[in-house]
Amino acid sequence: MPEVLSAALVALAVLVMAVRTCAAAIKALHDAWPLLLAVAMLAGALGVWRVACTVRGRRRDTQRLATLRITLAEVDAMDDREFEYALRDLLIRDGWSARRVGGGGDQAADVISDHTHLGRIVVQAKHTRVAGKVGSSVMYAVKGTAGPAHRARHAVVVTNGAFTRDAMAWGDRHGVHWVDRDRLRRWSENGTALHELLGLSALVRRGRFRRAA
C-alpha cells in the first residue's frame, strides 16, 4: 500500500509539472505572438519577393531568347562549350525544350531537345575553324546513338565550318541532318527555325479509338 501511495504522489507531481509547463508555454506564446506574427509576415513577404524575382527573370530570359540572333563572327569566337549552349538557346527560341548534355560519355549528343509536335532531336555540335570540315565518322556516330541511346526521332550535326561531300551524302541517305556554315547563318543570324530549315516532319498521332468497319 505505501508503494501505491508513493507512485500516485509521483504521478500527481509529474502531472502538476506538466500542467505548469503547458501553462508557461501558452503564456509565453501569448506574450510573444506579435513578434511571431511579424516574423511570419516577414518570411511570407520574402518568399513572395523571391517568387516575383524568379518570374521576372524567366520573363526576361524568354523575351531575350524570343529575339535571339547570333552572328557567325560571334559563333567563331566561341569555344566548344559556349557553342553548345548557343545551340541550346537557339532551339529554345524556336520553341523546343532544350538542354545541354555535352561532355564525357555524352554518346554523340551535345544538346537534346523535345518538341510537342516534332518529337525529340539530338544535336551534335562541331565547333571548328572556318575552313575545317566534318567527316563521315561523325555522322556514323550520331546515327548509331540517336535512336537507341537517346530515343530521338531526329538527329542533326551542326558546325560553323563545312562537311565533306561523303558526310553530307551519307547523312542525306541515312536520315542524319546537317547544318553547315551557310545553314547556320540562316538559323542563327536570320532567325529561321531549325525545323523549318531542315523540313522536319511532325509526329503522326494515332487516334484513341478506331473507326468501326
Image (cartoon, helix red, strand yellow):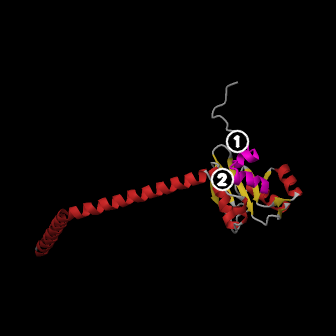
Q: Amino acid at mark 2?
A: Leu
The alpha-carbon separation of the residues under discs 1 and 2 comes to 16 Å
> Residue 162: x percent and y percent?
82, 59
In the picture of the structure, the residue carrying the numbered disc 2 is 91
- Residue range in magenta is 179-201
In the picture of the structure, the residue carrying the numbered disc 1 is 202
> Residue 129: x percent and y percent?
79, 66
Location of the N terminus (image quadrant) = bottom left
In the image, which is nearer the foreground, mark 1 or mark 2?
2
Q: Secondary structure at mark 1?
A: loop
Q: Which residue is pictured at 75% across the width and 64% down the height? A: 127
Do residues under tags 1 and 2 come within 8 Å of each other at their CB atoms? no
Whether residue 179 is visible: no
Q: Of callouts 1 and 2, which one flags the residue occurring earlier in the amino acid sequence? A: 2
Q: Is residue 105 above or below residue 172?
A: below
Residue 114 sits inside the magenta stretch: no
Q: Which residue is pictured at 47% across the width and 57% down the height? A: 54
Nearest to the observer: residue 198 or residue 160:
160
Q: Which residue is pictured at 75% across the width and 44% down the height? A: 199
Q: Can you tell which quarter of the image residue 10 is in?
A: bottom left
